[in-house]
Image (tube, helix red, strand yellow):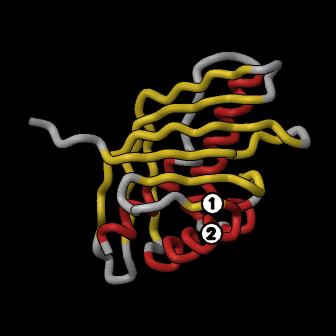
Amino acid sequence: MKLFTYSLVVLLLAGVAPAASAGAAEDVVETLRLRGHMFSEGNMDAWMAGFTDDAVITTSLVPFRMDGKEAIQAYYAGVFQTYPTRRVAFRQPSARVYNGDTAAVSNAYLHVTLVDRNSQATTLYLRQSVTWIKQGGRWLIADGHASRLPASP
């Protein structure tokens, strides 16, 4: 169950982190903020619309990456069902835009709280990197990677 929880958080990392520069970077930041709301609300259709068809999500707690929308959707369906209450807070978010404002990379630290149906809360501290591609005028996630922060000494 903990492995599932941590993997869920990694996926969260793939979609929520504000950016720090003007123009296209602001668009990425706004997209990230909206995705944070979608995650908290459990809006699966809106959540999945934010991924490219060939998106890849990688977590540090499951042995293999998830390739493509079908695998990603199956994963999130389980997360939304298992944790009906989800909250994400970001620290030190950043975004950089490249290739004529058609590609971007965002980074952030995340504080994620997940509450299961028995009201048991799980808190995770993560770091994430997300690669965004602009398709059809929208920023979509092409690749997301999240990992737990190392324990403090």
Rendered position, 146 above or below 38: above
Callout 2: 10 Å neighbours few (<14), some, many (20+)? some
For residue 67, the mark is 1
Rendered position, 132 above or below 120: above
Q: Residue furthest right?
A: 136
In the structure shown, which secondary structural element does the residue marked by tag 1 occupy?
A: strand
In the structure shown, which secondary structural element does the residue marked by tag 2 occupy?
A: helix
Displayed quadrant of residue 27: top right
Observer-nearest of 46 and 56: 56
Callout 1: 10 Å neighbours few (<14), some, many (20+)? some
Residue 38 image position (x, y, % from top left) = 63, 58
**Horizontal side of residue 21 vs 138, given as left or right:** left
Q: Residue furthest bottom?
A: 118
Residue type, numbered disc 1: Asp
Quadrant where the image shows the N terminus? bottom left
The residue located at (62%, 45%) in the rendering is 143
Residue 117 image position (x, y, % from top left) = 39, 82
Residue under pointer 2: 71
**Horizontal side of residue 111 vs 38, given as left or right:** left
Quadrant where the image shows the C terminus? top left
Residue type, numbered disc 2: Ala
The residue located at (68%, 61%) in the rendering is 68
**Marks 2 and 1: CB-CB under 8 Å?**
yes
Residue 46 image position (x, y, % from top left) = 73, 61
Residue 137 image position (x, y, % from top left) = 88, 38
